[in-house]
């Protein structure tokens, strides 16, 4: 699913095209180019992969194949709130996959995806170094340890309440203008 809406894609593609100028069109530049795009824009959209393929003069399916082979690349823009669920060994043993499923069910997206309103994205990550707190999720850079389905509910509810408050504050400030 394309969550870019096509609106922000044009400047993104223009920027990528200008970044590609500094790379000669050799296939060995493929991974460094994909890494550079991801670093700057946080994800790779299908059109970006086509632009890269054209620049390197390789088939688009080859670029897509390489990009999907490495799980360092994401194909959806990250959400305003980024949820990363640890599935390292300690977290997996303590039910990290159940936590991931809970987030997926609650937000109605799969890992690696972003909600259509761009509020949330979910990713799985390897050990984040706090195994004693397993199972662990990283939510907007905050470590949430000893995760449980009820904590998933609580976190999402907290964000929904925050969003409602923001909406109300925005409406109030608009009505004062
Ligand atoms: S395995 Fe999850 S923090 Fe180490």
Image (cartoon, helix red, strand yellow):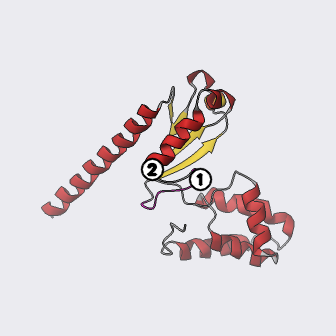
Which residue corresponds to the image point at 75% horizontal and 78% vertical from the top-left? Answer: 54
Q: Which mark is residue 138?
A: none
Q: For this rendering, which residue is in front, 149 or 133? A: 149
Neighbour class for label 1 at 10 Å: few (<14), some, many (≥20)? some
Considering the whole magenta stretch, tell me its main secondary structure: loop
Answer whether residue 114 is magenta in the image.
yes
Q: Quadrant of residue 65?
A: bottom right
Q: Secondary structure at mark 1?
A: loop
Question: Which quadrant holds residue 26?
Answer: bottom right
Residue 134 falls inside the magenta stretch: no
Judge the density around disc 2: few (<14), some (14-19), many (≥20) Cα neighbours within 10 Å. Answer: some
Residue 16, image x and y in percent?
65, 71
Q: Disc 2 beta carbon < 8 A from ligand 1?
A: no
Q: Quadrant of the N terminus?
A: bottom right
Mark 1–mark 2 distance (CA, rounded to whole Å): 12 Å
**Which residue position is annotated with label 2?**
107
Q: Residue at x 69, y 51 (%)?
A: 72
Magenta stretch in the rendered image: 111-117
At x 42%, y 60%, the residue is 117
Q: Position of residue 140 (x, y in %)?
A: 48, 42
Residue 57 lies, in percent from the top left, at: 82, 78
Q: Give how far across and how far down residue 118 sits, in percent.
A: 45, 58
Q: Which residue, given by chain and number where applicable, does mark 1 sit on?
A: 112
The quarter of the picture where the C terminus appears is bottom left
Is residue 124 something one can see in this rendering? yes
Q: Is residue 51 above or below residue 29?
A: below
């Amino acid at each position: 699913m394309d969550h870019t809406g096509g609106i922000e894609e044009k400047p993104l593609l223009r920027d990528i095209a200008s970044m590609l100028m500094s790379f000669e069109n050799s296939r060995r530049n493929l991974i460094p180019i994909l890494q550079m795009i991801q670093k700057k824009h946080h994800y790779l959209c299908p059109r970006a992969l086509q632009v890269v393929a054209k620049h390197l003069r390789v088939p688009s399916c080859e670029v897509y194949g390489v990009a999907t082979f490495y799980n360092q690349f994401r194909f959806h823009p990250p959400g305003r709130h980024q949820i990363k669920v640890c599935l390292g060994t300690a977290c997996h043993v303590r039910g990290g996959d159940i936590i991931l499923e809970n987030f997926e069910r609650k937000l109605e997206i799969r890992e690696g995806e972003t909600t259509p309103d761009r509020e949330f994205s979910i990713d799985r990550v390897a050990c984040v170094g706090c195994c004693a707190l397993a199972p662990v999720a990283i939510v907007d850079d905050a470590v949430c340890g000893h995760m449980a389905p009820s904590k998933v509910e609580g976190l999402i509810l907290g964000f929904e309440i925050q969003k409602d408050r923001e909406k109300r504050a925005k409406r109030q400030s608009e009505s004062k203008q």
